[in-house]
Amino acid sequence: MKRLAPLALAFLALAAPALAAAEAQPSAKALALAKRYVVAAQAARILEDEGPTVAQYMISRMAAPPGGDAKEAEVKHAMLDAANAAVAAKTPEFLDKTAAIYARVFSEQELEAIVAFYDSPAGKAFVAKGQAAALPMAELIRSLGSDIQKDTEQRFCAKEAALCQAAPKAN
């Protein structure tokens, strides 16, 4: 999931105005264009890592199965299969609901331009190479987050020194 964080953030950033938008039903054309965008942008990749993430979480909440390492490996494999199947079953709903959000947020003209971009060589390259940028972007965000935390602490403590005496130091 970490490698897709920038892609997920981009999808969420594009959809954020939907929270403020009226709940008007989009036109059939807008919905069709939004579905083309969602497919072209490979939105389903956002869910790729959810199966293993869900399986790992579910396994962490289970007691160790009796039967040793072999049984434990069998249970983990079965849980991963179940989680991947659950994600696969929800993917069409995710794509339909994502398309509906975009169809409400963007005009037909905007959706036509977005689809034209994603259908273009540059748009296809953007999708194909986006994952190559995902890991460096995640590392950058993590690095900046740490720097921002330290800077916040320094700025706050410069103004509220008495409150910082008992506060734990940022790493």
Image (tube, rainbow, N blue to C red):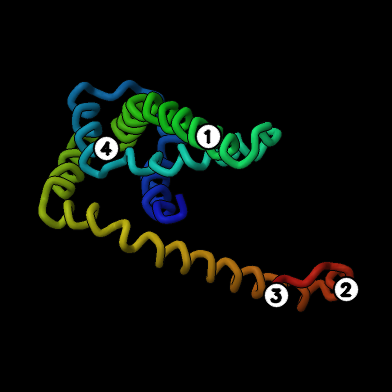
Provide the residue designation for mark 1. Answer: 74
Q: Which of marks 3 and 2 is in front?
A: 2
Q: Position of residue 75 (x, y in %)?
A: 55, 33
- Under mark 1, the amino acid is Glu
Disc 4 residue crowd, few under 14, some 14–19, many 20+, Cα 10 Å: many
Residue at image coords 54%, 39%: 73
Residue at image coords 37%, 59%: 134
Disc 3 residue crowd, few under 14, some 14–19, many 20+, Cα 10 Å: few
Sequence-first tag of 1 and 3: 1
Secondary structure type for disc 4: helix
Residue 104 visible? no
Q: Is residue 139 left or right of residue 30?
A: right
Q: Which of marks 1 and 2 is in front?
A: 1
- How far is mark 1 from mark 4, CA to CA? 36 Å
C-beta proximity under 8 Å, tags 1 and 2 = no
Q: In this view, does 124 lie above or below 165?
A: above
- How far is mark 2 from mark 4, CA to CA? 51 Å
Q: In this view, does 77 lie to the left or right of 35?
A: right
Q: Which mark is residue 155?
A: 3
Sequence-first tag of 1 and 4: 4
Question: In this view, which residue lies farthest toward the left?
Answer: 121
Disc 1 residue crowd, few under 14, some 14–19, many 20+, Cα 10 Å: few
Provide the residue designation for mark 4. Answer: 38
Image quadrant of residue 71?
Answer: top right
Q: Is residue 69 above or below residue 66?
A: below
Secondary structure type for disc 3: helix
- Under mark 4, the amino acid is Val
Q: Position of residue 82 (x, y in %)?
A: 47, 28
C-beta proximity under 8 Å, tags 2 and 4 = no
